[in-house]
Image (spheres, rainbow, N blue to C red):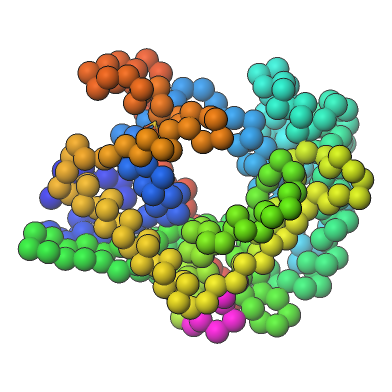
C-alpha cells in the first residue's frame, strides 16, 4: 500500500492501483521532487494571492476562451470589449495598481481608464491588446480554423494511457489528464492544440523555447490517443501575446509559433512521462521521506522558489515555517470536463 496514497492514486483492488497525472504535476516533479512533495502530497501553498503575472495570464486565457467559444457564431469587437472588461474586473486586476504598482505600470502602461458600457474600469492598453488581437485574427481564424474544443478537459475516462509497471508487491497503470486551451482543425485536415501564452515582449529566438515542450507534445499525443489515429496530428500552435506595448509601432504584439513533432519524438515524450510517473509512484509507495531537493532550481530568474523559505532553514525548524507562512489548499485537480469532441 502506498505510504502516501494521494488524491491522484486510486486503489482499484488488492495491490492494483491507477495513477492520474497532468503536465503540471510531471513538470513540477521534473523541476524538483521536493517541490512536488510540498505541492501535491502536502498540498501547501504560500499565504497570499496570485502574482500580477499569473493573474494577467489567467485574464488573457479567459479572454481567449470567450473569443474562440463564440468564433463560429460570430461577434463584433464591442462585444469582446465588454467581456474582456468584465473579466478584468472579475480577476480584480486593478488591485495590482496598489499591491504591485511597478509591474502593473510596466505591463499595462499609464492607467488610462476606459469605461466600457459605463460599468467596468479597464486600462486602455489591455483593451488595445484585445482590439489588436481581434483585428489580426478574427477573420483569419474564422476562415482557416474549425473549432473542435475550447478549454475541454480529457483523461478522467482513462483515454490516454501512459503505460504502467508491476513488481512482486503491486501493479499500477498511469493515465494522463489535460485541458488544452483550444483544439482546432485547419483546411488541410490537420488537428492540433493551440496554447495561449503571455510574455513580456515578443523576442527574437523565442521559437526555440517551445520545442521540446512537454505540455504541447503531451496534448498532441493525447489527441492521437483519443481519436485513435496519428495521421494529420503532428503539430501545435503557440499563440503568444506580449503584455507590454511594443516600443516601436511596427513591432508586433503577437507571434504564432508552429512546432512539429514526428512520431518518434512523441514516443520520446511518452517514455519521459512514464519515467516521471514511475518516480512519483515509487516515492508515494515506498519512500515516505525521499523527495530529494534539486538545489539548482531554488532560484529561477533571480526569483526564489515558493518553498525556499522552508528549505533554507534546518529540518527541525521547517514545520514552524509551514505553520506560519503556508496554508493547506485543495488537492490539484483542474480538469473536470469531457473528452475532445466533434472531431
Ligand atoms: S526551495 Fe529548492 S529544494 Fe526546495 S522545493 Fe524549491 S526548488 Fe526544491
Q: Which corner quadrant of the image does residue 4 belong to?
A: top left
Q: Which corner quadrant of the image does residue 172 belong to?
A: bottom left
Q: Position of residue 335 (x, y in %)?
A: 47, 53
Q: Position of residue 77 (x, y in %)?
A: 87, 51
Query: Left or right: 211 with respect to 81?
Result: left
Is the residue 250 above or below the residue 315 in the image? below
Is the residue 262 above or below the residue 312 in the image? below
Query: Left or right: 161 with respect to 278?
Result: right
Q: Position of residue 278 (x, y in %)?
A: 26, 57
Q: Residue furthest left?
A: 168
Prevailing SS of the magenta stretch? loop
Query: Left or right: 111 with respect to 190?
Result: right
Is the residue 303 above or below the residue 161 in the image? above
Say which residue appears at 55% left-offset and 84% top-offset: 231
Q: Is residue 25 visible?
A: no
Q: Which corner quadrant of the image does residue 190 belong to?
A: bottom right
Say which residue appears at 36% left-offset and 47% top-offset: 29
Indicate yes or no whether the magenta region holds residue 115.
no
Say which residue appears at 73% left-offset and 53% top-offset: 204
Say which residue appears at 83% left-offset and 40% top-offset: 245
Is the residue 250 above or below the residue 299 in the image? below
Q: Quadrant of the C terminus?
A: bottom right
Task: In this rendered view, identify the residue nearer to me: 259 or 41.
Answer: 259
State which image quarter holds ligand 1: top left
Task: In this rendered view, identify the residue nearer to me: 326 or 142.
Answer: 326
Q: Is residue 155 visible?
A: yes
Q: Which residues are drawn in magenta?
A: 229-235
Amino acid at each position: 500500500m502506498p505510504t502516501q496514497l494521494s488524491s491522484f492514486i486510486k486503489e482499484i483492488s488488492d495491490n492494483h492501483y491507477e495513477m492520474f497525472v497532468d503536465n503540471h504535476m510531471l513538470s513540477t516533479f521534473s523541476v524538483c521532487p521536493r517541490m512536488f512533495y510540498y505541492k501535491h502530497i502536502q498540498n501547501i501553498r504560500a499565504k497570499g494571492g496570485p502574482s500580477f503575472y499569473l493573474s494577467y495570464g489567467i485574464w488573457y486565457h479567459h479572454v481567449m476562451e470567450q473569443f474562440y467559444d463564440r468564433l463560429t457564431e460570430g461577434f463584433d469587437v464591442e462585444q469582446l470589449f465588454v467581456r474582456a472588461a468584465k473579466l478584468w474586473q472579475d480577476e480584480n486586476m486593478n488591485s495590482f495598481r496598489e499591491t504591485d504598482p511597478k509591474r502593473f505600470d510596466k505591463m499595462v502602461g499609464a492607467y488610462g481608464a476606459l469605461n466600457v458600457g459605463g460599468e467596468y474600469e479597464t486600462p486602455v492598453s489591455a483593451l488595445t491588446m484585445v482590439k489588436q488581437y481581434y483585428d489580426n485574427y478574427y477573420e483569419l481564424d474564422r476562415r482557416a480554423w474549425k473549432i473542435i474544443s475550447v478549454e475541454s478537459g480529457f483523461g478522467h475516462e482513462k483515454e490516454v494511457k501512459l503505460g504502467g509497471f508491476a513488481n512482486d508487491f503491486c501493479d499500477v497503470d498511469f493515465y494522463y489528464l489535460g485541458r488544452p486551451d483550444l483544439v482546432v482543425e485547419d483546411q488541410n485536415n490537420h488537428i492540433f492544440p493551440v496554447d495561449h501564452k503571455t510574455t513580456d515582449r515578443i523576442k527574437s529566438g523565442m521559437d526555440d523555447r517551445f520545442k521540446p515542450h512537454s505540455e504541447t507534445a503531451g496534448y498532441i499525443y493525447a489527441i492521437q490517443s483519443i481519436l485513435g489515429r496519428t495521421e494529420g496530428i503532428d503539430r501545435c500552435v503557440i499563440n503568444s501575446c506580449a503584455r507590454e506595448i511594443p516600443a516601436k509601432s511596427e513591432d508586433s504584439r503577437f507571434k504564432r509559433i508552429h512546432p512539429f513533432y514526428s512520431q518518434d519524438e512523441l514516443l520520446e515524450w511518452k517514455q519521459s512521462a512514464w519515467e516521471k510517473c514511475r518516480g512519483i509512484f515509487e516515492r508515494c509507495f515506498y519512500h515516505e521521506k525521499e523527495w530529494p531537493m534539486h538545489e539548482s532550481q531554488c532560484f529561477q530568474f533571480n526569483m526564489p522558489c515558493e518553498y525556499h523559505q522552508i528549505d533554507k532553514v534546518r529540518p527541525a525548524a521547517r514545520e514552524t515555517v509551514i505553520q506560519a507562512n503556508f496554508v493547506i489548499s485543495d488537492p490539484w485537480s483542474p480538469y473536470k470536463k469531457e473528452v475532445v469532441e466533434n472531431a
